[in-house]
Image (cartoon, helix red, strand yellow):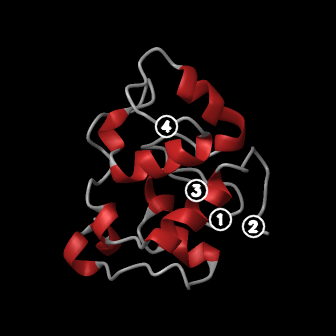
């Protein structure tokens, strides 16, 4: 198992780190494809191309969350990953402890980046 996926092994992501580190330190690339992030080729979770898929997820009949925008959906999905699991992906695969390891600034930067991503995008 990737050490970054063990809560005790992961230090707080403050949001002051470079964007690539904000996304890689908590292990996002292990499970997700993330445009523009080197090595982000995971296939356990859905691709994080939320500039393309975010609105569809908010309108999905299975969505049980409270988010009104793609940005809010991303934050909600990180803090409460069981609120909505994309069809075809396993339940309970995403760690539930990210809220204690990602600062508000880190979450804001993650959401801002991911809400703009479509296939083939690169890090700004």
Label 2 sits on residue: 123
In the rendered image, the vertical position of residue 49 relative to residue 13, given as above or below: above
Q: Residue drawn 37% across and 26% down?
A: 64
Q: Nearer the viewer, residue 96 or 30?
A: 96
x and y percent of residue 16 in the render? 55, 85
In the rendered image, the vertical position of residue 35 relative to residue 101, given as above or below: above
Q: Which image quadrant for residue 92? A: top left
Mark 4 vs 1, N-terminal side: 1
Q: Which image quadrant for residue 37? A: bottom right
**Picture disc at residue 67:** 4
Mark 2 vs 1, N-terminal side: 1
Label 3 sits on residue: 111
Q: Nearer the viewer, residue 48 or 55?
A: 55
Say which of marks 3 and 2 sits in front. Answer: 3
Say which of marks 4 and 3 sits in front. Answer: 4
x and y percent of residue 8 in the render? 20, 77
x and y percent of residue 97 in the render? 26, 61
Say which of marks 4 and 2 sits in front. Answer: 4
The answer to the question of whether label 3 and label 1 lie on touching residues, with beta carbons closer than 8 A, is: no
**Secondary-structure class at tag 3:** helix
Label 1 sits on residue: 37
Q: Give the position of the C terminus as an image quadrant.
A: bottom right
x and y percent of residue 82 in the render? 30, 38
The answer to the question of whether label 4 and label 2 lie on touching residues, with beta carbons closer than 8 A, is: no
Q: Residue drawn 62% across and 82% down?
A: 18
**Secondary-structure class at tag 4:** loop
Mark 3 vs 1, N-terminal side: 1
The residues tagged by marks 2 and 1 sit, at their Cα atoms, a distance apart of 7 Å
**Secondary-structure class at tag 1:** loop
């Amino acid at each position: 198992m990737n050490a970054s996926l063990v809560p005790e092994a992961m230090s707080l992501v403050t949001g002051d780190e470079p964007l690539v580190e904000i996304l890689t330190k908590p292990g996002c690339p292990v499970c997700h494809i993330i445009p523009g992030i080197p090595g982000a080729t995971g296939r356990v979770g859905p691709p994080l191309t939320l500039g393309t898929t975010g609105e569809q997820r908010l309108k999905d009949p299975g969505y049980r969350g409270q988010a009104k925008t793609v940005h809010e959906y991303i934050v909600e999905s990180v803090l409460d990953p069981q609120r909505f699991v994309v069809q075809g992906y396993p339940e309970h695969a995403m760690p539930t402890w990210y809220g204690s390891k990602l600062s508000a600034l880190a979450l804001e930067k993650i959401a801002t980046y991911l809400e703009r991503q479509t296939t083939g995008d690169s890090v700004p």
